[in-house]
Image (cartoon, rainbow, N blue to C red):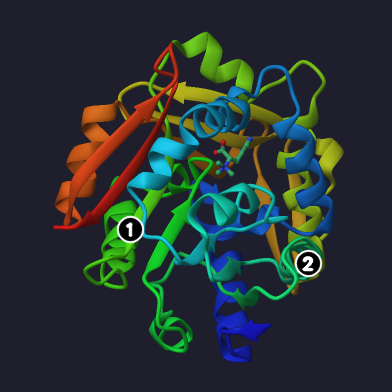
C-alpha cells in the first residue's frame, strides 16, 4: 500500500479540521466521517430502504454492464476512486478483462480490506492501493506508468456530490489529465428529485444516518483531543433547492462550551456544524460540467425514474 500523504499532510489536515470548527458557521469536512465506525455505518446506510442511490446505481450497472463495457478499453487499469471494500469494482474487472486494479481511498482500513478481497477473487491480477484524499489534485501518473494499459477512472456512488461544483470541476480536470487517448471515466452521480425523497434518504427512520453524522464528533475528539458529546447535538438533513444540495448538519441542542485541545468553542442552542453537502445534478447539468472539465464523447445511462445518472467520458 502506498501512503501518498506525508506526516506533514496529516498535520495540515488536522489544522484545517480544527480551523473549521472555529469558523462561523462551524464546519467539518465529510472526509472525516470514515473511521472504522463510520465505514460500518456507511455500509449500513447503503442497505437502508430510504437510501436509494447505491441500489439505483447498482441496478443501472447490472442492467447495462455489457453495453457500458463496450465503451471502455479492454485490458485496462481499473482505478477505483474511493474504493471502500472494492465490491463495486469486481464485476467490472471481469467485464472489461482488466489487467490491474488500483484502489484509491482515504481510509487505510478500506484499502486493507479491498486489497485482501481482490487478491482472493482475482489471484494473479496486479493490485495496488493508494491512500490519499481527493480534496487535492490526483497525482497517480507514476503509479499508472508502471503498467502499459489505459486507465479507467471509476468514481461511482455520487461521491462527486460531496464537492462544490467548482471543486468537482477541479477534481474532474485532474482525472482528465491522467486519461490519455484510450483512458475513460466511468462516473455515477445522483439526480435531482423531489425534496421528500432526498430528505428521507439523508434522515432515515432508523436513525442510521444520524449516527453516521454524530460519529464524526468522536473522530474529532480523537483527532483533536476534544470533548464533544454526541448526545448534545442533533442530526439535521435539509435539501437546499437553490444550491441543489442536501446539507447535513449537527445542531447544538443547548448552549454549551466544548474543549478542543487547549482551546474552547462555545455553541449556542440551535447553532449548527455543517458536516456534509451532497450535490444533486440534472443529467444535462452534469454533462455540462464534464464538458467544462475537458471531457467529450459522453455516454449516459439512467434508471426508469431518472433518479441516478451514469456517464462514460473520454478526453475531448
Ligand atoms: C458517499 C458522499 C455518496 O452523499 O450520499 C450518505 C454519503 N451521507 N448519507 C452521499 C452519505 C449521508 C454519500 N456519499
Q: Position of residue 192 (x, y in %)?
A: 38, 21
Judge from the rendering whether residue 240 lies leftward or rightward of residue 214; answer left or right. Answer: left
Q: Position of residue 145 (x, y in %)?
A: 41, 87
The answer to whether the residue bearing label 1 lies less than 8 angstroms from the nearest atom of ligand 1 is: no
Give me the C-alpha separation between circle 2 and circle 1: 27 Å
Judge from the rendering whether residue 285 lies leftward or rightward of residue 69; answer left or right. Answer: left
Towards the viewer: 58 or 73: 73
The residue under the point 73% across, 71% down is 108
The residue under the point 65% across, 38% down is 268
When the figure is inspected, residue 34 is found, relative to residue 200, above or below; the finding is: below
The residue under the point 78% across, 47% down is 215
When the figure is inspected, residue 43 is found, relative to residue 192, above or below; the finding is: below
The reply to whether residue 234 is visible in this rendering is no
Residue that mark 1 sits on: 184
Q: Which is more N-terminal, label 1 or label 2?
A: 2
Tell me the mark number nearer the camera, choosing from 2 and 1. Answer: 1
Quadrant field for ligand 1: top right
Tag shown at residue 109: 2
Pointer 1 local density, CA inside 10 Å: few below 14, some 14–19, many at least 20 = many
Quadrant of res 103: bottom right
The residue under the point 39% across, 24% down is 302
Circle 2 — which element? helix
Quadrant of res 307: top left
Q: Quadrant of the N terminus?
A: bottom right
Q: Quadrant of the C terminus?
A: bottom left
Judge from the rendering whether residue 303 lies leftward or rightward of residue 7; answer left or right. Answer: left
Towards the viewer: 162 or 269: 162
Quadrant of res 136: bottom left
When the figure is inspected, residue 193 is found, relative to residue 107, above or below; the finding is: above
Q: Position of residue 158 (x, y in %)?
A: 48, 40
Amino acid at each position: 500500500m502506498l501512503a501518498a500523504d506525508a506526516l506533514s499532510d496529516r498535520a495540515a489536515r488536522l489544522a484545517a479540521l480544527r480551523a473549521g470548527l472555529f469558523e462561523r458557521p462551524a464546519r467539518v469536512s465529510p472526509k472525516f466521517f470514515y473511521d472504522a465506525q463510520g465505514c460500518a455505518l456507511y455500509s449500513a446506510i447503503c442497505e437502508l430502504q430510504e437510501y436509494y442511490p447505491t441500489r439505483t446505481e447498482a441496478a443501472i450497472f447490472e442492467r447495462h454492464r455489457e453495453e457500458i463495457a463496450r465503451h471502455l478499453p479492454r485490458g485496462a487499469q481499473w482505478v477505483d476512486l474511493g474504493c471502500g471494500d472494492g465490491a463495486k469494482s469486481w464485476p467490472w474487472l471481469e467485464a472489461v478483462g482488466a489487467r490491474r486494479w488500483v484502489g484509491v481511498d482515504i481510509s487505510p482500513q478500506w484499502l486493507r480490506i479491498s486489497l485482501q478481497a481482490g487478491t482472493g477473487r482475482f489471484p494473479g491480477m496486479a493490485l495496488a492501493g493508494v491512500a490519499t484524499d481527493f480534496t487535492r489534485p490526483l497525482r497517480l501518473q507514476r503509479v499508472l506508468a508502471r503498467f502499459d494499459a489505459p486507465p479507467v477512472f471509476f468514481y461511482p456512488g455520487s461521491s462527486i456530490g460531496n464537492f462544490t461544483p467548482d471543486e468537482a470541476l477541479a477534481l474532474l480536470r485532474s482525472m482528465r489529465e491522467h486519461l490519455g487517448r484510450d483512458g475513460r471515466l466511468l462516473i455515477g452521480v445522483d439526480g435531482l428529485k423531489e425534496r421528500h425523497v432526498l430528505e428521507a434518504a439523508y434522515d432515515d427512520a432508523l436513525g442510521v444516518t444520524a449516527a453516521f453524522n454524530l460519529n464524526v464528533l468522536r473522530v474529532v475528539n480523537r483527532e483533536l483531543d476534544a470533548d464533544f458529546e454526541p448526545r448534545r447535538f442533533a442530526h439535521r438533513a435539509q435539501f437546499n433547492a437553490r444550491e441543489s444540495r442536501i446539507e447535513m448538519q449537527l445542531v447544538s441542542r443547548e448552549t454549551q462550551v466544548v474543549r478542543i485541545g487547549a482551546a474552547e468553542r462555545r455553541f449556542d442552542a440551535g447553532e449548527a456544524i455543517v458536516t456534509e453537502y451532497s450535490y444533486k445534478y440534472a443529467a444535462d447539468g452534469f454533462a455540462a460540467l464534464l464538458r467544462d472539465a475537458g471531457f467529450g464523447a459522453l455516454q449516459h445511462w439512467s434508471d426508469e425514474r431518472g433518479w441516478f445518472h451514469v456517464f462514460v467520458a473520454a478526453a475531448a
